[in-house]
Amino acid sequence: MTRPPPPSHKRSERAITREVQASEAKTNLSQLLDDVERRETIIITHHGRLTARIVPETHRRQQEIDRALADIQELRKHTGKISFEEILA
């Protein structure tokens, strides 16, 4: 039995685009959704033809970013400015 070639990866400025066969998508849907949450776009092919595309939901992600920035600004009101190293500590 021969193994299929590795999935195709294309890198853009913001995200990775990867092609997977429909059978692989069916088997690994949960993992693919995790990858999409990490800003990866998944193209699903069926018999070599583009069938579907799973893309990150940008509106939800932007809300998360806006909420995190607001939390940081609120924290700064109470703590003053802190360095990047202090944040990571």
Image (cartoon, grey):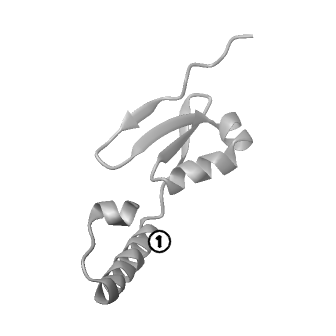
Q: Quadrant of residue 89?
A: bottom left
**62 shown above or below 25:** below
Residue 32 falls left or right of residue 73: right
Give the SS element for disc 1: helix
Say which amino acid is labelled 1: Arg
Mark 1 closeness class: few <14, some 14–19, many ≥20 residues within 10 Å:
few
| Total numbered labels placed on residues in the image | 1
- Which quarter shows the N terminus? top right
Q: Quadrant of residue 63?
A: bottom left
Residue at the top extreme, as displayed: 1
Residue 70 falls left or right of residue 64: left
Residue 31 falls left or right of residue 37: right
How far across and how far down the image is residue 57, in percent? 48, 64
Residue visible at 47% across and 47% down?
41
Query: Which residue is denoted by mark 1 in the rendering?
Result: 60
Residue visible at 26% across and 66% down?
83
**74 shown above or below 47:** below
Q: Which of 89 and 57 is in front in this view?
A: 89
Residue visible at 28% across and 46% down?
13
**34 shown above or below 68:** above
Residue visible at 57% across and 19% down?
5
Q: Which of 66 and 52 is in front in this view?
A: 66
